[in-house]
């Protein structure tokens, strides 16, 4: 099937479309094919990958206090150990484009999601902090590759479907994270061993990823009207051959336009600056996610003095609110614009984190717990569309190979994840755990300020959500 999007023809080769996929050979029936089972199978594959990725992470978050106590770690040392996860993710982000040039993004996401599930199951068996940190490093590698590849697959599915889907996919991630965290909290409340719980979660998540494999899209091919690969810079020898032919009055044929010797483009200066800016913008939202994943259970246990079964509710509050925000996010962006929604999200982060910070000083007992959870939820709702919006923006940067923009964005985001846990750990160690929410207030302010210049780069609907049939008619 060939789909025209903003002057680019995207072709999914028929030889690698997943089991049971069919496509009409007649281009007049392309619109009908998009609405068939063939179009919906990749949506299901993407949803399974996002759900599995969220669930495996959510499953371990409520058990982090147990692992910290078992290894007898201080807050600062715990923060350094947790930083090994984003450190591994930095390396994984660099590997992703290499893997995606050899296999389709869907196949890469399935393989690394299964590997991440296995590693997560082993984390519970860590006998010393060095093993704990090493497994987190390996988990970060697998998770980063899964993250980039499944988002690249999701954006391709969105393009084929012809309307915004990326926020819904991230909503499925939040749903998986909520379910995983709920299972972890229940296991902690009943005193189940971390090892047993994580093995069960790994089996479920790996099975969901395996089920996505036959439903995925095949590898993408981006061409111009002459069939030239837009991801490649043509060899100078072939270019001179075309110039010589043109000087004799001969127009280059499509076959002559496809160069046998190619080299991949790297992001130019302006593109790289834009990708870094989008990455820093996403990092501001990641501060909230990192707090929920790494510190929320410890925060509730140490500041509000709740038990193990309740400590996981902080992560559930953030991810549950994100789930609601992402389910409604596409309609909000289409109705009010990405800039207004982004600014409103930043303000919500400031209000939610500020309420939690003040509540930790002036309240106690059930009232404090209620205000903390409500503040976490408001902050979680605020960042619901920020990271998906940044990913769509990075993937739409022109002139880059498949997955390159997302890989750079992911690398910058993982760098933020690398710095956040030690920073919060130092704050908790030297100033007090109550102040661990302060970085979220700063992040919310930056989101509100940066939403205009970054999310408002192009007027009108997002290019990634433009209907293919409209572009074809243009």
Image (cartoon, rainbow, N blue to C red):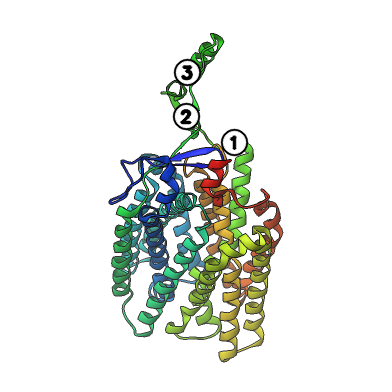
Number of the front mark, 3 or 1: 3
Residue in the image at 60% along x and 48% along y:
276
Number of the front mark, 1 or 2: 2
Q: Earlier in the sequence, mark 2 or mark 3?
A: 2
Residue 72 appears in the rendering? no
How far apart marks 1 and 2 lie (CA) works out to: 21 Å
161 or 308, which is in the foreground? 161
Q: Earlier in the sequence, mark 1 or mark 2?
A: 2
Residue in the image at 56% along x and 80% along y:
373
Residue in the image at 53% along x and 64% along y:
421
155 or 107, which is in the foreground? 155
Residue carrying label 2: 228
Residue carrying label 1: 268
- x, y (%) of residue 332? 61, 65
Quarter of the image where the N terminus is located: top left
Residue in the image at 67% along x and 80% along y:
358
Q: Earlier in the sequence, mark 3 or mark 1?
A: 3
Identify the image quadrant of residue 343.
bottom right
Residue carrying label 3: 238
Element at label 1: loop
How far apart marks 3 and 1 lie (CA) works out to: 23 Å
Vertical placement of 14 versus 290: above or below?
above
């Amino acid at each position: 099937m060939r789909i025209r999007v903003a002057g680019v023809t995207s072709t999914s080769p028929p030889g690698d479309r997943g089991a049971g996929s069919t496509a009409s050979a007649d281009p007049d029936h392309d619109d009908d094919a998009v609405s068939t089972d063939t179009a919906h199978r990749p949506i299901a594959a993407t949803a399974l990958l996002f759900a599995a990725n969220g669930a495996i992470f959510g499953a371990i978050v409520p058990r982090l206090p147990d692992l910290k106590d078992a290894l007898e770690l201080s807050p600062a040392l715990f923060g350094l150990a947790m930083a090994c996860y984003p450190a591994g993710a930095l390396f994984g982000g660099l590997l992703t484009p290499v893997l995606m040039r050899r296999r389709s993004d869907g196949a890469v996401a399935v393989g690394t999601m299964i590997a991440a599930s296995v590693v997560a199951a082993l984390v519970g068996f860590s006998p010393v902090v060095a093993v704990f940190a090493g497994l987190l490093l390996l988990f970060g590698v697998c998770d980063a590759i899964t993250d980039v590849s499944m988002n690249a697959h999701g954006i391709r599915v969105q393009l084929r479907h012809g309307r915004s889907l990326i926020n819904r996919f991230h909503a499925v991630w939040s749903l998986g994270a909520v379910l995983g965290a709920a299972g972890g909290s229940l296991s902690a409340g009943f005193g189940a061993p971390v090892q047993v719980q994580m093995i069960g979660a790994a089996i479920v998540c790996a099975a969901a990823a395996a089920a996505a494999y036959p439903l995925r899209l095949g590898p993408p091919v981006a061409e111009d009207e002459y069939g030239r690969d837009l991801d490649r810079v043509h060899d100078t020898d072939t270019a001179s051959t075309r110039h010589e032919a043109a000087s004799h009055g001969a127009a280059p044929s499509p076959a002559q336009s496809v160069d046998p010797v190619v080299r991949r483009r790297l992001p130019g200066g302006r593109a790289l600056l834009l990708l870094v800016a989008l990455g820093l913008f996403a990092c501001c939202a990641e501060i909230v996610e990192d707090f929920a994943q790494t510190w929320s259970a410890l925060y509730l246990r140490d500041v509000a003095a709740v038990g193990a079964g309740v400590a996981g509710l902080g992560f559930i509050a953030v991810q549950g609110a994100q789930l609601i925000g992402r389910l409604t996010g596409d309609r909000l962006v289409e109705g009010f614009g990405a800039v207004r929604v982004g600014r409103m999200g930043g303000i919500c982060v400031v209000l939610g984190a500020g309420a939690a910070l003040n509540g930790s000083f002036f309240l106690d007992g059930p009232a404090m717990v209620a205000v903390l959870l409500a503040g976490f939820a408001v902050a979680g709702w605020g960042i619901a569309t920020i990271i998906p919006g940044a990913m769509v923006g990075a993937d739409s940067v022109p002139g880059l190979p498949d997955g390159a923009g997302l890989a750079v964005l992911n690398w910058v985001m993982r760098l933020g994840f690398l710095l956040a846990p030690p920073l919060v750990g130092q704050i908790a160690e030297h100033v007090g755990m109550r102040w661990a929410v302060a970085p979220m207030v700063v992040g919310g302010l930056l989101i509100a300020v940066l939403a205009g210049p970054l999310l408002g780069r192009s007027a009108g609907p997002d290019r990634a959500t433009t209907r293919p049939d409209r572009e074809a008619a243009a």
